[in-house]
Image (cartoon, rainbow, N blue to C red):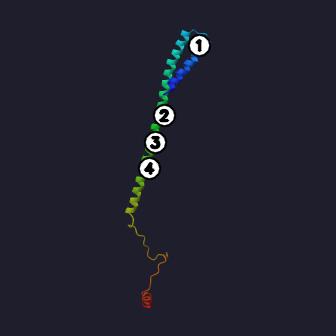
Amino acid sequence: MKIPFLLAMTAALVTGIISISNNAGTNQTCIRMIIALIGFYILGAIVSSTLTGIVEEQQRRKLEEEKQRKLAAVKLEEQQMAELLEQEEHLGTNLDLVAGSSLDDGFSPLDLSQAIRTKVKE
């Protein structure tokens, strides 16, 4: 907001100093300073609006990227939940039974006679 004013005032001061150093008349110096004020104020307004537009564009893109990230995270979470539900639906439908397997799972059946003896001793 201050760019047009500061730019115009600086240009007017420089113009005034240069005009005075060249021994120009007071009227001519004032006219040059007024022209510099108006010209550089317009230039400053253009620069200010351009900078404001750039900043707003960056903020808009940043918000858009954040929305995209959140949307991607939600989609990923939904996909993971769908995969988990799919796995739960198939749970218990496949049994892997092998007869005569050489795998020892550590199970040994308890003989009935041994169980009766231990019960009698108690």
Callout 1 environment at 10 Å: few (<14), some (14 to 19), or many (20+)? some
- Please tell me which of labels 2 and 4 falls first in the chain: 2
Q: How far separated are the C-alphas under marks 2 and 4?
A: 27 Å
- Label 3's element? helix
Disc with the residue nearer the chain's start (3 vs 1): 1
Q: Is residue 107 left or right of residue 85?
A: right
Determine the secondary structure under disc 1.
helix
Give the CA separation, mark 1 to mark 2. 38 Å
Please name the residue shown 53% across and 21% down the image.
9
User: In which quadrant will I find the C terminus?
Assistant: bottom left
Find disc 1 in the rendering and name its residue. 19
Between 107 and 11, the residue placed more toward the observer is: 11
Q: Residue furthest front?
A: 26
Residue highlighted by disc 4? 73
Q: Secondary structure at mark 2?
A: helix
Residue under the image location 42 percent in, 53 percent down: 77
The picture places residue 59, in percent across and down from the top left corner, at 46, 37
Of the two numbered discs 3 and 1 in the rendering, the one whose residue sits closer to the viewer: 1
Q: Position of residue 43 (x, y in %)?
A: 50, 22
Measured from the top left, where is residue 6 in percent x and y?
53, 24
Q: Which mark is residue 55?
A: 2
Helix, strand or loop at label 4? It is helix
Q: Are marks 3 and 1 in contact (CB under 8 Å)?
A: no
